[in-house]
Amino acid sequence: MVTNVWSARPQLSHASLFILAYILGGGFAHALAIIPGTGISLWPPSGLFLATLIIAPLKTWPWWILFGLVSELLANTLWFHNPLPAATFIFAGNAAEASFGAWLLRRTCGLPMRLETYSEVLALIVLGAGISPIISATSGSLTLAAYDIQPFGESWILWWIGDATGIAIIAPLALIVFQNWNSKSQVLTNRWIEACSLAGIFVGVSVLSISGYEPYAYIVLPPLLWAAVRFEFKGAVLALVLLAAVATVLTVSSANQFASDPDSQRQKQITLQLFLGISAFSALIVAAISRQHQQALTTLKESINALKERERELSQLVDMVPVQIRRVTPQGEPFFFNKRLLDFFGLTDISQLDQPGTSRLAAAIGSLVHPDDAANVLETVRRSLSTDEPYTMKYRMRRADGAYRWVDGRGEPLRDEDGKVIQWLMVSIDIDDEVRAQEKLHESEKQLRRLVDAVPAQIWCSTPAGDPIYVNQQLRNFVGLELGDFDEPGETRRAVAHRKQTHPDDLPMVRDRLDECRRTGEPFLMRYRMRRADGMYRWVEGRSEPYRDEDGTILQWYGVLFDVDDQMKAEEALRERERFLWQLVETLPAMIDCAAPDGEPIFRGKGLREFLGYELDTLDSSGKSRLEGTLDAGVHPDDVEDVKQHYARCLATGEPYARRHRFRRFDGEYRWVETRAAPMRNDEGVIIQWNVICLDIDGEVKAEENLRLARESLARASQAASMAELSASIAHEVNQPLSAVINSTTACLSWLQAEPPNIERARKSADRTIQSAHTAVDVVRRIRSLFQQSMDIRDSTSLDGVVGEVRDLVAADAAKHGVSIQADIEGELQLLAFDRVQIQQVLMNLVRNSLDAIGPEAEDRLLRIRVYKTDHWVYTEVSDHGAGVLQPDKIFEPFFTTKNKGMGMGLAISRSIVEAHGGKLWAEDNYPKGAKFIFTLPTAVVVAA
């Protein structure tokens, strides 16, 4: 038993090709899935598996099932990543489907199965693609449901249609490849040209229809049916493969009309499956009809050839002539039947036809002609006998075995020299096969005509000169006319059709183009306006191709018309909208820029192009990306790094961009600009474009700088005046008690130095000294009280607003020093009410001190402001990497300064303000270099409701 199984193993090359095709088919199905991971639109391995089992001997089936299991597991590893048990159960259903389907087809159609008859195609569609996928769909859906991958109800119909479509498309292809593997038949050049042209047209129409460019996906049916009619099963199968390949490519790029939003993806996938399945069913059925049509023609040709051969033999051997010959008297009595006629009737002698009371003619017709034809035959023969005129007719005669067969009966009178009829020669020719072939041909033509009338396109056919000879029902409904309505005296159908249906403004152009195409034989393609039945003119797209014989002579022109009026109007509206938006963007008093999601510029407005002095495509030859080239060439060297970092952060996070920096104009001058960018997102929130606006604020920035300098000068002057006035006031108030202290101290020393010392007097002088000192203290306390009674306005303004204001106020100074300011503020910070102006003065003083500390020699030119919460305190840190602080405790003393022009009062006042708010202010070293100033403020206590 083991030896028999081993000896039945397939060839290694065949097994390798099967495994490779199975895996690639799985990848093809994975690529065509509109809903990734939940279903497939087409499962090619089902068709491959079924065709392999149909062709392979029954004893090799275990090997092919084993190869299928290996292929399924490899495909699962590469494409689907299902659990191993789930993949195994799924394959079990696939194997059962292929085995059962192959068994049904082999039993129904027999072997070999060549798909050359209508019954074989119908059996493949019904049994192979209709019934057998039920097994795989049920097994696979149960497996997915068991592993919680997808519910049974949602996956079953997708699975069944996907397997059915895979069998309908791939099984015929595999059978054709298997049966023609060693074929060496050659194809004529014109057939190759026709096939390549048809393939190009089919791919183009498929791309337009599936991508949604054409309004109806089934517009691919005319070229698909063309391939089926012209090239039968090979053309139909290859066209279906091209259609599936186009659908795959467009599905992977999300450019087809079956891709949609997540809510309708399943319905779209079923629509795609039905589209492929209906296309496959239509193509295979038409190919079968075309094949039978060709067979009928072949039979007809064979019958004609046989007839000619019999006529030739008649001239040689009268008795063996393959024609049924009779000789009849002028009165109509048969007296001679040739041997072939006697054999046909199963008679040995003509006398066997004699019946008492009935003429031999009537008895022969009554017993040997079909009852439905007997009366007509007898009447025709008697009329010819009475008029001496020949006759011809077709009727059915009973053969010796009782079967009625169609014959072509003819009779000619044989006359003597005087013209008198001396006898009749009558013959009958068996044309049963021809008649039946013609009936089949007529039926095929009817089916094709019904199919063409049902195609959702306006199809026509004309003579080589261009006169219409056929229009389908769709075109007749569109124009509201029949073909005969174009027949008018003195004019050709072509001229009448153009005059009645083509718009007068388009008529000369259409007529000239058609004349040129008929003269050169090249295809026709043009859009023009055509009158509809209701009198309205609608835009149509006309296409036509010549049909040639084997010598290349044009026999007919076939054409199709597509109603593109709605599409033309939509395109015109879109163009008008684009023109309006273009004019709007070009005339805005701002510099506009649009960038891709990665920041690469894709469009620049006129204002920005004129400001920079070059076009956008100039950057493509710089060796850098457009964004990098723009920033390096345009942004001021002191600003470029900070701008790049800010851009990079916004591109990574998707947050809007806003920044002021210096930008180089075309004349080389750097001007301050304010750049803002915001992302544009699709319905899923994915960034599809960045919209950028750039405003020239150089005059505004310079005005702000001048205003700032004026304010600083005024502040310094006011400070100096206030300090002078304050100093004079303090000196005046404190002068008298201090003078009294000096005088009393001097007197005390004099009394102590006397001989002998006057202790009593000295004690009194000391008391007066103490009293004068208290007086000075009271004076200072009153001055301090005077300052403390100033207006203290506190509110609950957020601290991030104060930080933002300070950052904006010092932005110009920071840019001048080449320093970047980074602010990190923790969200949801709730402070106690504080004096916004005083805290702003504290933060401003700390930031300005840090800017002064970052000297020109500093490498790290970053000033960081950090606000965060710990316990019930909000910490504000201002850190830098400057020179650092040598005496962190002493710098908060009044009049102590490390600056050449400082007064030494800023930090002392800042500490007083912070402490007045219940907080602390101190300094620390900032590792590895620089200083860090920290102050705290109390948070608000939130009481739960």
Image: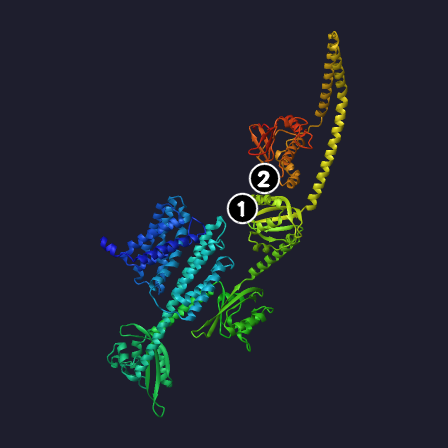
Count every numbered label the image shows and give the total.
Answer: 2
The numbered mark at residue 4 is: none
Who is closer to the viewer here, 405 or 433?
Answer: 433
Q: Do callouts 1 and 2 mark residues in contact (Cβ within 8 Å)?
A: no
Query: On the image, which quarter does residue 582 sit in?
Result: bottom right
The answer, for residue 6, to whether it is visible in the render is yes
Furthest residue to the top? 756
Quarter of the rendering occupied by the C terminus: top right
Q: Amino acid at mark 1?
A: Gly
Query: Counting residues from the N terminus, which is met first, the one under dot 1 or under dot 2?
Result: 1
Q: Amino acid at mark 2?
A: Glu
Relative to 262, 416 lies left or right: left
Who is closer to the viewer here, 406 or 596?
Answer: 596
Identify the residue under disc 1. 685
Note whether 166 is above or below 835 in the view shown.
below
User: What SS does tag 2 mark?
Assistant: loop
User: What SS does tag 1 mark?
Assistant: loop
**Residue 29 rendering spot, x and y as whole percentages:** 41, 53
Query: On the image, which quarter does residue 819 sit in?
Result: top right
**Residue 860 rendering spot, x and y as whole percentages:** 58, 39
Q: Which residue is at 71% across, 27% downward?
A: 790
Identify the residue under disc 2. 859
Q: Residues within 10 Å of mark 1 (few under 14, many from 20)?
A: few
Q: What colour scheme was applied to this rendering of the protein?
A: rainbow
Q: Residues within 10 Å of mark 2 (few under 14, many from 20)?
A: few
**Residue 270 rendering spot, x and y as whole percentages:** 44, 53
Who is closer to the viewer here, 617 or 723?
Answer: 723
**Residue 58 rendering spot, x and y as whole percentages:** 27, 57
